[in-house]
């Protein structure tokens, strides 16, 4: 967790290596799961429990909420902060392939699951052993948001990080309610796919 935090804050020193925090988080998730000899249901990555989680109709509200927030983010940006559109594209273009939709879907699915394993199934779950859930969500989401900082005007970067922080809290709530990173990854994937496709058309 300390290493993930340190790498995430490396952006402030001009080192664009924050993405490595996801790889570290995934590695430690599997190492920790093996050391604690958890059964799959306890790790937060139980694929068999997806159906059970989705039987709870209230979880759909939380799954869709980040998508709604992204709609608000893009609409507001289009109206009052158009520079954000280009900023967002610049932050994501090196990761995704906008010209190949199937490859884009695959990339976003892998990225969403990777981030959810690292930040929710590992970081949030471990932190929740020491803190109540609300501080856990806040601390995890602050670090998660800072890991996404890229160079830009202070207003645009702050706007970007604010919405990333809120969405991170929502993904954290989904994980807290389901103890399943697959479910938070579904929400994360849907929200990201929508944003990237819409913003690519707005450019």
Image (spheres, rainbow, N blue to C red):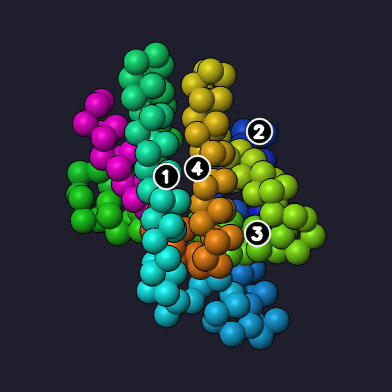
User: Which numbered mark, 4 or 3, is in the foreground of this view?
Assistant: 4
Picture coordinates of residue 76, whole percent (x, y): 38, 21
Residue topped by disc 2: 12
The dot on residue 187 is: none
Residue 178 percent location from the top left of the image: 52, 65
Q: Nearer the viewer, mark 2 or mark 3?
A: 3
Quarter of the picture holding the N terminus: bottom right
The CA span between labels 2 and 4 is 22 Å
Predominant secondary structure, magenta span: helix
**Few, some or many C-alpha atoms within 10 Å of disc 3 (few <14, some 14-19, many ≥20)?**
many
Mark 1 and 4 residues: CB-CB less than 8 Å, in contact?
no
At 42% from the left and 36% from the top, the residue drawn is 69
Q: Which residues are magenta?
A: 188-203
The residue singled out by tag 1 in the image is 65
| Residue 202 drawn in magenta | yes
Disc 4 crowd, CA 10 A, few/some/many (<14, 14-19, 20+):
many
Residue 53: x, y in percent? 44, 69
Residue bearing mark 4 = 167
Q: Is residue 45 visible?
A: yes
Q: Which residue is rendered at x = 39% and y = 14% of the image?
A: 80
Q: CA distance from mark 1 to mark 3?
A: 22 Å
Task: Compare marks 1 and 3 and give the one earlier in the sequence.
Answer: 1
Q: Quadrant of residue 94?
A: top left
Which is closer to the viewer, label 1 or label 2? 1
Q: Is residue 184 above or below residue 80?
A: below
**Residue 119 lies in quadrant:** bottom right
Q: Is residue 118 visible?
A: no
183 vs 2, nearest the viewer? 183
- Helix, strand or loop under label 1: helix
Q: Secondary structure at mark 4?
A: helix
Q: Residue at x 27, y 51 (%)?
A: 104
């Amino acid at each position: 967790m300390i290493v993930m935090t340190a790498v995430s804050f490396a952006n402030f020193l001009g080192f664009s290596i924050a993405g490595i925090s996801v790889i570290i988080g995934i590695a430690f998730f599997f190492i920790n799961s093996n050391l604690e000899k958890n059964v799959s249901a306890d790790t937060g990555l139980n694929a068999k429990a997806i159906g059970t989680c989705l039987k709870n109709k209230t979880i759909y509200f939380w799954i869709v909420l980040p998508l709604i927030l992204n709609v608000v983010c893009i609409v507001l940006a289009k109206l009052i902060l158009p520079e954000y559109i280009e900023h967002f594209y610049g932050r994501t273009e090196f990761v995704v392939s906008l010209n190949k939709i199937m490859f884009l879907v695959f990339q976003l699915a892998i990225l969403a699951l990777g981030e959810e394993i690292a930040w929710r199934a590992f970081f949030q779950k471990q932190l929740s052993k020491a803190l109540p859930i609300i501080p856990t969500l806040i601390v995890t989401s602050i670090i998660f948001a800072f890991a996404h900082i890229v160079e830009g005007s202070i207003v645009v970067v702050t706007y970007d990080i604010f919405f990333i922080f809120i969405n991170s809290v929502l993904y954290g709530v989904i994980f807290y309610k389901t103890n399943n990173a697959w479910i938070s990854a579904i929400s994360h994937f849907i929200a990201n796919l929508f944003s990237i496709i819409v913003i690519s058309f707005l450019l």
